[in-house]
Image (tube, rainbow, N blue to C red):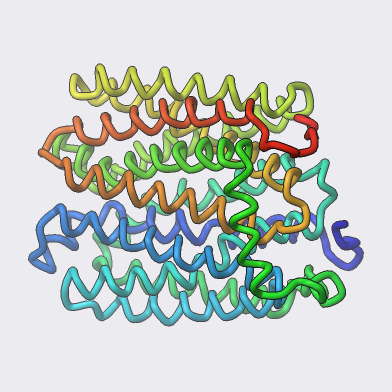
């Protein structure tokens, strides 16, 4: 059962947890406008620089797969504090990177640390809030989190002009340091010793096997991860599509990026109402069908004009803010005893498929929007198809309600 919220201000807690969840998108989005400039400064090809995103996603996946079971066994606070400290140190080291290869390696280290914040921010929701509120709280967290990527590319573009790309990593280090202090002073242990006394570390890691043999769980993971991957195909390809192919100035890239975040905010707000009136599984079926149609439209029309890229992405990227919280809420409902492992697998799967999408866009890059549009379409359609596994529960699984 969730712990009592006495002594924890729910609003402040949600804001802090949203900041923790924002480590990933903020660490990527702030420096997107500077990718071409970093490539030029470090004398690196565009394809290699795109792997600074893929490297970050790799580190996130590795870190989160460790943090979930570790936090189930040893508690949330020690894992969280250690991870954020590593993030701050790695961010400062990125300031002094002398080559693309060094920057990629340091980004992996930065991500391993930041992964603790991302997975623990979601896991604490399960510790603190009643299960029936999980989807609403996760949606609200996602809405608050969208403030960071809305501002980050714009801030990154202007920081690039005023102070150069290395200042971006100083800003990220400062953000991490502030969060480290707030967690140390304001966030108590939400997974007390009496709730983990009978959980061995080996058993905590074995939970992954149980999760991956449950067909509906795999369906939710695929819907979550492939939708996220489609978004990262857009994140990886859009700086070059917008700035180099369509000629958008770097300092204005953030405004186009912000249109998608505005769409996320609007659709996430609507999702908070929808989850109270429509069964989550039904809602997820509708949402993944819509992004599949939007992805196909992008693939067919994306090379024609800037507008043909922007409009379908408003739908496919915008719905990530709804599909993500809804699938996570269903996972938390299905696996209450291994919330840390479930969230670690979910979020690492997100970033793992994001890494794959990012690598595909980098590998297929041909100077046109075609690679980005193709990968977005494939992942959106895959999310819709993958969710069909929720219709086939594992043998012997007890029936699960589809509402919260």
- Which quadrant of the view contains residue 159? bottom left
Q: Position of residue 228 (x, y in %)?
A: 45, 42
Q: Position of residue 357 (x, y in %)?
A: 32, 44
Looking at the image, is 340 positioned above or below residue 240?
below
- Residue at 14% x, 53% y: name it: 46
| Quadrant the C terminus occupies | top right
| Quadrant the N terminus occupies | bottom right
Q: Residue furthest front?
A: 395
How many labels were placed on the picture? 0
- Residue at 8% x, 66% y: name it: 43
Q: Position of residue 380 (x, y in %)?
A: 41, 29
Question: Is 280 situated left or right of 155 in this image?
Answer: right
Question: Is 100 situated left or right of 92 in this image?
Answer: left
Q: Nearer the viewer, residue 200 or 85?
A: 200
- Residue at 21% x, 22% y: name it: 305
- Which quadrant of the view contains residue 392? top right
Q: Nearer the viewer, residue 32 or 54?
A: 54
- Residue at 27% x, 23% y: name it: 299
Looking at the image, is 27 positioned above or below residue 222?
below
Q: Position of residue 278 (x, y in %)?
A: 74, 22
Looking at the image, is 394 positioned above or below residue 15?
above
């Amino acid at each position: 059962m969730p712990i009592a919220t006495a002594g924890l201000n729910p609003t402040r807690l949600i804001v802090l947890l949203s900041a923790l969840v924002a480590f990933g998108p903020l660490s990527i989005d702030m420096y997107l406008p500077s990718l071409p400039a970093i490539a030029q400064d470090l004398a690196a090809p565009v394809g290699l620089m795109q792997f600074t995103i893929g490297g970050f996603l790799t580190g996130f996946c590795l870190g989160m797969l460790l943090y979930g079971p570790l936090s189930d066994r040893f508690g949330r606070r020690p894992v969280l504090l250690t991870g954020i400290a590593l993030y701050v140190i790695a961010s400062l080291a990125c300031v002094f990177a002398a080559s693309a290869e060094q920057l990629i390696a340091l980004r992996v280290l930065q991500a391993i640390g930041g992964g603790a914040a991302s997975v623990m921010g979601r896991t604490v929701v399960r510790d603190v809030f009643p299960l029936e509120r999980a989807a609403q709280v996760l949606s609200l967290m996602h809405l608050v989190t969208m403030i960071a990527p809305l501002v980050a590319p714009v801030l990154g573009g202007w920081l690039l002009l005023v102070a150069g790309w290395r200042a971006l990593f100083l800003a990220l280090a400062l953000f991490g340091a502030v969060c480290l202090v707030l967690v140390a002073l304001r966030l108590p242990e939400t997974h007390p010793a009496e709730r983990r006394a009978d959980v061995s570390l080996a058993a905590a890691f074995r939970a992954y096997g149980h999760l991956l043999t449950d067909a509906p769980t795999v369906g939710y993971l695929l819907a979550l991860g492939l939708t996220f991957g489609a978004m990262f195909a857009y994140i990886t390809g859009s700086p070059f599509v917008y700035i180099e192919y369509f000629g958008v100035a770097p300092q204005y890239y953030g405004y186009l990026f912000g249109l998608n975040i505005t769409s996320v905010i609007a659709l996430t707000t609507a999702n908070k109402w929808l989850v109270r009136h429509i069964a989550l599984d039904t809602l997820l079926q509708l949402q993944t069908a819509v992004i599949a149609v939007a992805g196909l439209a992008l693939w067919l029309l994306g090379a024609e004009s800037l507008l043909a890229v922007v409009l379908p992405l408003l739908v496919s990227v915008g719905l990530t803010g709804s599909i993500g919280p809804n699938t996570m809420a269903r996972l938390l409902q299905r696996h209450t005893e291994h919330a840390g492992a479930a969230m670690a697998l979910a979020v690492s799967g997100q970033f793992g498929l994001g890494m794959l999408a990012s690598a595909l866009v980098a590998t297929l890059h041909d100077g046109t929007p075609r690679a980005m549009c193709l990968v977005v379409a494939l992942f959106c359609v895959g999310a819709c198809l993958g969710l069909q596994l929720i219709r086939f529960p594992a043998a012997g699984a007890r029936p699960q309600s589809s509402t919260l």
